[in-house]
Image (cartoon, coloured by chain):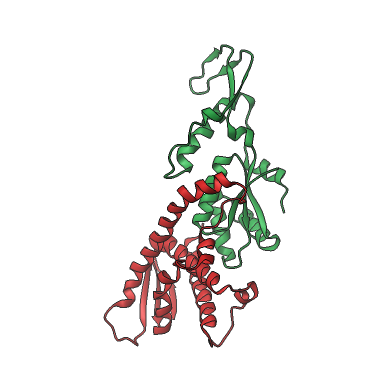
Chain colours: A red, B green
Amino acid sequence: MEISRHNDHIEISELDPFLAELLRQIPASASPDGVPAAEQRLFSSPANRKETELCAEWKAYVEPELRRLFQSATETVAADLEQLNRNEKSLANRTLRIPAKHADAWLSALNQARLVIAAKNNFTESELSDHFRSPIGSRRDLSLFQINFYGFLQEFILRDVGA
Amino acid sequence: MIPAERIILESASPIPPTARHSLFELAASYVSVSTMSREPRRGIGCRAQSKETEGTTLILEQTGSVTTAEPTKETRSEEDLDLPWQVVVHNDPVNLMSYVTMVFQRVFGYPREKAERHMLEVHHKGRSVLWAGMREPAELYVQQLHGYLLLATLEKIS
């Protein structure tokens, strides 16, 4: 895989089928549906539970806005990922171009996916710090690899976006 | 952790006594800005406290004119009475350090060094107070931080 920066886009080329599949899974991985721990992480409490009025207002008015925000980001990413579904030989390497104006959506979707995967697997801090764990021998190992791969992409996009 | 007093000095500009009425208006104006799709809050005025004051000379900044006000009631909003609240960000082993730094720069407009200092405080001490002041803008900050998926809470300073 090669990743390079251009004027108006980031290009990820030489994507092998495995990494391309991991990218395709970003929108699905970002969904907290059916996993209370992930739901709780994406929509965390804005204050101590004793602040009942504040928490209730938040749930009623702010949380729906956050849901729309997160969904909009994953939809943008899903649309960009359509590039990987073009009619090419299934085992051929692919190229993905991320428009610069979609960088924030990608940062959000990658972050959602990382948080949801971590919550689903209940990873410990030491597991998350182990960036060189290999080989992938289980579903859990694969999930950790996925988190690290998405983190690598985030880092690269961050350098492009800045503050 | 940075003492709360220091945060207040850094984040809240001093408000001269003559600007208290402006402060009240500012607090009210935040409601429509910060609450996104929220319905208007039920009358802030209804929750205000009043007390009698002596006649006061007010300088109207917009027109530059000087006028003498009749003895009137000074109103203080709930936000004044509730001061101060603080915005706290908590540690999260998943979010990248560079990402958290970028978020602090964007949301609070902090220079990179200050944003990194707060990020490291979150990382090493588990939490950092990012801002302190009135409740409405504090809520807005927490909302933005949640939009970036950081673990942030609003706390009343006891």
Identify the residue at horizontal 68%, vertical 41% (top origin). Answer: B9
Image height of A41 relative to A131, above or below? above
State the residue at coordinates (44%, 45%): B36
Q: Residue at x 70, y 60 (%)?
A: B125
- Drawn side of residue A90 relative to residue A104, left or right: left
Q: How many marks?
A: 0
Residue A156 image point, x, y percent: 49, 69
Q: Position of residue B139 (x, y in %)?
A: 55, 45
Q: Is residue A40 visible?
A: yes
Q: Quadrant of residue B7?
A: top right
Q: Is residue A5 visible?
A: no
Q: Is residue B58 above or below residue B128?
A: above
User: Vertical placement of A52 versus A161: above or below?
Assistant: above
Instruction: Please state which of residues A53 and A30 is positioned toward the viewer in this rendering.
Output: A53
Choose between A60 and B30: the one closer to the eye. Answer: A60
| x and y percentages locating residue B60 in the rendered image | 53, 20
Front one among B99 and B72 = B72
Left or right, B85 with respect to B43, comes to right
The N terminus of chain A - image quarter: bottom left
Residue A96 at x, y percent in the picture: 37, 74
In the picture as drawn, the residue positioned furthest to the left comes out as: A87
